[in-house]
Structures are given as C-alpha cells and as structure tokens.
Image: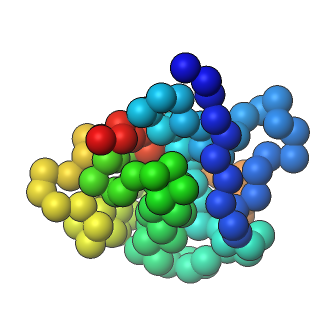
C-alpha cells in the first residue's frame, strides 16, 4: 500500500518537504495536517474565530474531495484555539458541516501559533468508504 501526497489549489505545501505534507493518503486513510485560515497565502477572517473555523473546514473539505471522499468520511478532528473562549465558534462551524453525531474531536485552548492573526488550527483524520 503506497503513500500518496495530496495537494490542493490555494494551500501551499511546506517549503521543506522533509517536515511533512498538508495531506497524506494511505489506502483508505486520509491524514490532513493542521489547517489554518489561510488561502493563497493570506489570512481569511482576521480577528473572527468563526470565519477562521469555517475556512479551516473548507480547506479540509478540499483535501477530502481531492482524496475522493467527502466530509462524511471524516472520523476525527483535532481543534486548537488560541483562546478557549473560541470553543463555541468551533462548535458552530462543525454543526454547519457535520450531521449528528459529528466526528470525534479533541479541543485544546491556549495554543500559540506561528502566524500572528491565526486563532484556530484544525487537523483531520478520515477513512474513505
């Protein structure tokens, strides 16, 4: 079973491929690295946690489509927030995309991100059906 790197338009791969990939598919499993609210190198939703959660999820949806899956295949999310008070924004954004019950999720507050305007980072694990 080979490992395949998956890329999508608007989301840059790391400059040094040794540090990882935005998305890896191996067999029917899809591993999506933490997505921040960036598109074409610019922050989307500066200062707005809900807008950033939505963009992170859109990025994940783009990778899922490129892998031949849908958001229904996502089974787990890891959500990192710069402030735990953004938890409701993460809940609201997920409710817009996932039917109940949504994927399992780990939510961590107090994350310190590399980019100043980033409030949210979301990674995903999916099993293609």
The residue shown at (26%, 72%) is 96
The residue shown at (44%, 44%) is 124
Confirm whether residue 45 shows in the render: yes
Q: In which quarter of the image is the C terminus?
A: top left
x then y, percent, for residue 14:
79, 46
- Nearer to the camera, 33 or 113: 33
Q: Residue 91 sits in which quadrant?
A: bottom left
- Give left or right: position of 108 versus 110: left
- Give left or right: position of 20 versus 78: right
Q: In which quarter of the image is the N terminus?
A: top right
The residue shown at (52%, 63%) is 62
x then y, percent, for residue 115:
72, 59
Above or below, comparing residue 55 to residue 103 in the picture? below
x then y, percent, for residue 119:
55, 63
- Nearer to the camera, 117 or 6: 6
x then y, percent, for residue 49:
46, 71
- Nearer to the camera, 4 or 51: 4
- Give left or right: position of 27 versus 118: left
Confirm whether residue 60 shows in the render: no
Above or below, comparing residue 36 to residue 104 in the picture? below
Of all residues, the one furthest to the top in this rendering is 1
């Amino acid at each position: 079973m080979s490992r395949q790197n998956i890329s999508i338009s608007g989301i840059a791969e790391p400059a040094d491929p040794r540090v990882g990939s935005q998305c890896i598919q191996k067999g029917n499993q899809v591993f999506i690295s933490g997505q921040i609210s960036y598109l074409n190198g610019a922050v989307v939703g500066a200062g707005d946690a809900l807008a950033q959660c939505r963009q992170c999820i859109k990025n994940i949806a783009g990778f899922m489509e490129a892998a031949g899956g849908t958001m229904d295949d996502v089974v787990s999310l890891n959500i990192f927030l710069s402030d735990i008070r953004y938890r409701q924004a993460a809940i609201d954004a997920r409710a817009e995309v996932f039917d109940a019950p949504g994927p399992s999720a780990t939510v961590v507050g107090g994350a310190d991100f590399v980019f100043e305007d980033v409030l949210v980072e979301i990674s995903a694990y999916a099993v293609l059906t």
